[in-house]
Image (cartoon, rainbow, N blue to C red):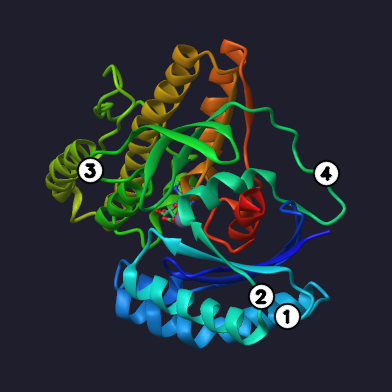
Amino acid sequence: MTEILGIESTCDETSAAVVQDGRIVLSNIIASQEEIHEKYGGIVPEVASRKHLEALPVVVEEALNRAGTSIEKIDAIAVSKEPGLPPALTVGYAYAQGLSLANKKPLIDINHLEAHISAIWLVEKGQKAQEIQYPYICLLVSGGHTQLYLVESPIELRILGKTRDDAAGEAFDKIARLLGLGYPGGPIIDKLARNGDEQIFRFPRPMIKSENFDFSFSGLKTAVKREVEKQKVALTRYKDNSDLHKELNNNLITDFAASFQEAVVEVLVEKTIRASCELGVNVITIAGGVSANSRLRELLARACKASGFTLFYPELEFCLDNAAMVAARAYDLL
Ligand code: KG4
Ligand code: ZN
């Protein structure tokens, strides 16, 4: 039995977790800085690193306690080394290094994106991990990255395509900001879109038919921005009747959320399915913060069913940044 302590601080979550045999999550403590960054409408790296520094000793101690273990009993320490916000990464890495040296425990450097992919294996104590056969296609969609992978074994991960500009999560965050909805935008848009009509605005589906597996979301962002401005002008007509103005505005926002989300999700689904068809791989997984999106899960599940592919997704709590996935990835590398 192997117990790994994972540490994560690449962005705005400070997290520590203890995972048994790369699968069973004994603890997964996440201190989020969302509220602080919400004030600024995005992440301020210097603020993030200061908050990580404060939170790290607390979350590590809590993770060990909740798992009913101690640093002496841990087999190895795993830490996200890259990619991420440099000031945030440095703080977490230095802390993990100190812990490893002081306690004579091996330190395993982890790629944060590969950790997201390994989140697929994680389960709570008492549950059984999903049985997934290699090779599989993984769609990794987070705030900083959008990539399609062919995963042939735990250590053979081939990038098939990636975003040329904005990541999918970044697009969600920027559109939410444009609509005055707060940060992070993904979960808010996901929720609002359920009350909206995705047919109202027909936004572009960038690169949906391109032969490669790359993505691009910045043109979509511009198209939404242009339409928002147009609608704002149209709304000024109702300014004198404030109730009507408010109601029209609320409807517009939910329709914008649904129409924008639909455009992103359609591109993601189409390209993932095409990669599976072209490579003859019939197992698909998803990973990263945007993989929590309910419409993505719905449309991808529908497309997989139609094509005869098997779809696996991580538990919601392991989609967003967390340290359990870092420990899971370390186990894959042992
Ligand atoms: O993987 P993650 O926690 O951090 C990075 O490694 O970037 O992903 C965060 C991103 C944010 O952009 C957030 O808006 C997005 O994931 N996100 C979502 C949803 N939940 C989080 N996007 C769409 N729908 C969601 N339900
Ligand atoms: Zn992440």
Describe residue 21's horizontal placement relative to residue 312 as left or right.
right
Which residue is nearer to you in this view: 230 or 22? 22
Q: Secondary structure at mark 1?
A: loop
Q: Residue at x 30, y 47 (%)?
A: 171
Residue type at numbered disc 3 = Asp
| Residue 286: numbered disc | none
Mark toward the viewer: 1 or 3: 1
- Label 3 crowding class (10 Å Cα cut-off): few <14, some 14-19, many 20+? some
Q: Secondary structure at mark 2?
A: loop
CA distance separating discs 2 and 4? 28 Å
Which comes before the other along the chain, label 4 or label 1? Answer: 1
Expressed as whole percent of the image width and height from the top left, the position of residue 141 reads: 43, 43
Question: Which residue position is annotated with label 2?
Answer: 105
Residue type at numbered disc 2 = Lys
| Residue 71: numbered disc | 1
Q: Residue at x 14, y 46 (%)?
A: 229
Asked whether disc 2 touches disc 1, contact meaning CB atoms under 8 Å apart, the reply is yes
CA distance separating discs 2 and 3? 39 Å
